[in-house]
Amino acid sequence: MITKPEIIKRFVSYVTIDTESDPESDTTPSSAKQWNLATKLAEELKAIGMKAVSIDENAYVMATLPSNVDYEVPVIGFISHFDTTPDFTGANVKPQIIENYDGTDIVLNEALNIVLSPNYFEDLLLYKGQTLITTDGTTLLGADDKAGITEIMSAMEHLIKHPEIKHGTIKVGFTPDEEIGRGAHKFNVEKFGAEWAYTMDGSQIGELEYENFNAAGAKVTVKGKIVHPGYAKGKMVNSMYIATEFINSLPRMETPEHTEGYQGFFHLYSIAGEVEKTVLQYIIRDHDREHFEARKEVMQKLTKELNSQYGREVIEIEIKDQYYNMKEKITPLMHIVDIAEEAMKALHIKPLIKAIRGGTDGSQLSYMGLPCPNIFAGGHNFHGRYEYVPVESMIKATEVICKIAELTAQRRN
């Protein structure tokens, strides 16, 4: 039996270590402080009895739980990331434990009047009567994805302590820099040695995902000409006005705030401008590969049209693909999703099978030869001060890992 005190103690020990990644760095890990948790995890894996524990020069942590059956079983893996997003500070996290949540407002920080309210965050009402872990309102929590690490570590310890639960060889991996899109870049799939794996990096209890966005980033550079404004007639070209034309020429309703489900979007997330030069940073997202390619073409065509309109190259655009929809790699292997779904149902968890409106290490790993659906880790409101996680959801996720291991052992190679 996996207990609340064990889960809480382990989770708190992880989230109180600052592991914020740095998108401006070109090292791996991107921030030196990620080593602090990576090293701790490697030592903890050894302490609970895992084998072949390793931590490489880029802070990727791997370990093996040997099979306890005498027949050949598929080797599977479980993966989570230990960095936290640079979107909001993860330094000096002070978790608060809310026992027997009563469905009312939670005052995160009285002095700063920061309140976590079900009037705004309706999902809170799903967890009445449960134990919640929240922030103190001044940092994020780090359940993304230290909840996943907690669950994997707790499941491995449980399986080691209960050899009556039959399982094949299980690999675990903990990665840096997922939050800045590099979590899988230096993951050694061959060394990991699993036929397939699951990332424990979803949100609400029951989530099971094997589809995600196709993704690209676009940098639009608009070039102007600066001239003294008193003598600028016919000479000045204000790049900010041209940039505004570009922005307004894209479909206004195809933005994150107007889309949901399988709908894709163009997302302008940064503008830096002066008369001489303006730089727009976009992300392009779509679940459908053809629509994804069409979105990129729309931006390329718009660039050509504006350059033609101004009679010279006033705009340069650079588009780079980031990741692709893992559905293409997982659909031929749907038994790996079926096992996870069966595990949830066996534990009386209603599977919520849906597409991720974002990305995951599992997407890149699937294209690197390691098919990798995503399973709930339990947290909500990631990347900000209102983040929280129900302890009961972490316990259930831990049980799902153990049940997947057990069900996979029933599938002889």
Image (tube, helix red, strand yellow):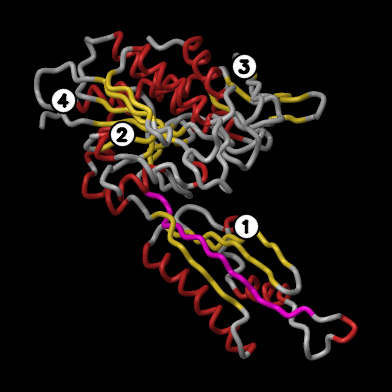
In the picture, the quarter occupied by the C terminus is: top left
Q: Is residue 117 visible?
A: yes
Mark 3 Cα-neighbour bin, 10 Å: few <14, some 14–19, many ≥20: some
Asked if the residues shown at circle 2 and circle 1 are in contact, with their CB atoms under 8 angstroms apart, the answer is: no
Amino acid of disc 2? Glu
Circle 3 residue: 97
Q: CA distance from mark 2 to mark 3?
A: 30 Å
Is residue 302 shown above or below 405? below
Name the residue: 50% across, 25% down: 37
The residue carrying mark 1 is 269
Q: Is residue 322 left or right of residue 256?
A: left
Identify the secondary structure beneath mark 3. Answer: strand
Earlier in the chain: of badge 2 and badge 3, it is 3
* Distance Cα–Cα, label 1 vs label 4: 48 Å
Residue 115, image x, y percentages: 73, 29
Is any part of residue 264 visible from this angle?
no
Question: Mark 2 Cα within 10 Å, few/some/many (few <14, many 20+)?
Answer: many
Residue identifier under label 2? 341
Per the rendered image, the range of residues in magenta is 211-226
Could you say where residue 285 lies in the image, as x and y percent from the top left? 48, 59
Q: CA distance from mark 4 to mark 3?
A: 39 Å
Give the Cα distance between marks 4 and 2. Answer: 15 Å
**Secondary-structure class at tag 2:** helix
Which element type, helix, strand or loop, lies under badge 1?
strand
Q: Which mark is residue 410?
A: 4
Q: Quick check: marks 2 and 3 in contact, CB under 8 Å?
A: no
